[in-house]
Amino acid sequence: MTDDRKIWNDFKSSKDYALSHIYHHHIDLLFRYGRKFSRDEDLIKDAIQELFFDLIRNRESLGDTDNIRFYLLKSLKNKIIKTLQKDQKSLHQVTEITEPKFSSVYSHEEDLIERENRERNEQLLLKGLNELSPRLREILFYRFTCELDYPEICDIMSIRYDSARKMVFRALRTLREVLSASDIMLFFLLKSC
Amino acid sequence: MKLKYLKYTTEELIDNKHFRAWILHGKKQEKWKEYTNQFPEFEEKVQRARKIILFLHENGTNSQSATVHELWNEIQQYNKNINRRKQFIRFGGYLKYAAVVVFALFLAGVGYHVLRNDDSIYHFSENSATQGGNDAKLVLSNGQHIALRKNESSIRVDNTDDAIKIDNDSVINMAQLDAHNNGQGLNEVTIPYGKKSYIELTDGTKVWLNAGSKFAFPTRFTGKKRLVYLTGEAYFEVKHNDKQPFEVSVEGIIVKDIGTRFNISAYDSDENIETVLLDGEVSLKKAEGIDLLNKEIVMMPGHKASFDKTNKAFKVVPEPNADQYITWIHGWYQFSGQRIDDVFKRLERYYNVKFIYRRPFPSSELIAGKLDLKDSLNQVLTTISDIVPIDYRISGNQVIVNQKVNELNPRN
């Protein structure tokens, strides 16, 4: 995380590479994160833009951070919530993930069987994910997509440490069960071939 | 690694930072593999955990690259505007030219040639001679070729001895050279990849010429200004002279010194011409075009000006690491926040090799560091592969680079 501290400080002292680095390293995640709150792409884009404008305008007076990702996520959440509240929409009313596309860099090199296997797994896991409550999906996103620490998750979700851990493990168990069930099925399928 | 991991449940593995670091980034691969090879039950858990980790890590739709790009442009523009307000770079105002534009554009059709600035028109004798295989040489204004045999040759135009000296041997008598073409012709230095050169001009100005560059200069400066030409990269320490300004003409722009140390990088293969000012003051302008519209940009020390060759536009930004841009004259190369493919582009010039990328390559990854160019290419690449996940193989003058393959990483 010391890298983050350096880049953040470079950004504060107006080095342009730092802005570019921060933007391009986190933009995908920020968009994905934004979509958890709203399907309105323009709203998300505006919120992200405003977030970066704020950063640039106030760069000298920004606080320190050694986790830029967390800093950005938290700021974006605040921005989006503010906008949504203004629009009289409540948070989590419209949530997330309809049909994720799993594009992969390696896809053209995989052979067909491998890809089918992977896609099957992903379909299963997606089904499992959709069975979870929005809150559980949110925590999985923080923990495994954003790789946040528990203290950071507690901060951003306003929950306590032990409940954060409990939620993560409950969500993971569901996903694991979905997979194991299918492994058994596959086993029988292969046997009957 | 600790044996306790063997007792972990799938969920505990997924939630473990070190385990994820292995799955996602290949950290401590060998040690984990030892366990999976030894304990089949553990391996089963690992496989399941891996699927879930990869799924959650990738989860979500990818953003539309067009939107990302568009947004970036807006942010960059905003950043520029804010910076401009804060910077003390003197830009000529836009508005005062607005009235002239219509008139001038009309003129452009009619009198284009009359108003063009002719300083930009110089063609180096061989256009693509900077590629590998060529020898370093000096071509005198009378057409005589002189081979530069050393890897770092020096050329001095010595006024007191009235001679051009190469590596401290007196070679060319200037009076003879002048007699040949009235002192009007230019001498041309060509430095291929893998070599460097140092040139001292007749006015005492010092020029360090980097690999893959060409430089043209007169034996004596007789006109109103001291005009030299460059492609490639050079670092200048100019002897200032108010009455006879020093100008470098580089592919479409002119850099004019006002008493200075500066570095210009203008390789054909690069999209931008970069001028970094260390001391003093330089002004920049486009060489072509109509003088009326041709704003002169004055740079302050510690700034970098990039001239976009396609859009023909300047961008000036503060460059706190200005010193790093001239480390090459001392035989090392220092950079921070540099794209890895830009770093490789440089190495291609220094070592006269060609990089070939296989498979998805993290070319936009930013790296920082310091490389000793006196080291062998192999040593330099080993250093780089310590910080970036790449594998490389040198074969002849080709370097084949791959993203490091993590045996377990490609999903199945």
Image (tube, coloured by chain):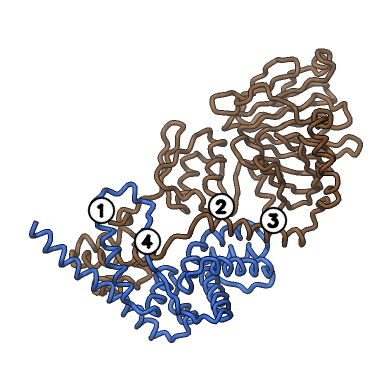
Chain colours: A blue, B brown
Residue that appears at 65% across and 40% down: B310
Per the model, the C-alpha gap separating discs 1 and 4 is 19 Å
Is B104 drawn above or below residue A115 in the view shown? above
Label 2 belongs to which residue? B369
Is A138 drawn above or below residue B269 in the view shown? below
Are the residues under badges 2 and 4 in a single subunit?
Answer: yes
Label 4 belongs to which residue? B24
Q: Nearer the viewer, mark 4 or mark 3?
A: 4
Per the model, the C-alpha gap separating discs 1 and 2 is 39 Å
Residue A49 in the image, given as x and y percentages of width and height: 60, 66
Numbered label attached to residue A114: 1
Per the model, the C-alpha gap separating discs 2 and 4 is 25 Å
Task: Give the secondary structure at mark 4.
Answer: helix
Q: Nearer the viewer, residue B66 or B44?
A: B66
Per the model, the C-alpha gap separating discs 2 and 3 is 15 Å
**Quadrant of res A193:** bottom left
Chain of the residue that carries numbered disc 3 in the rendered image: B
Label 3 belongs to which residue? B320
Are the residues under badges 1 and 4 in a single subunit?
Answer: no
Which class describes the residues within 10 Å of circle 4: few (<14), some (14-19), or many (20+)?
some
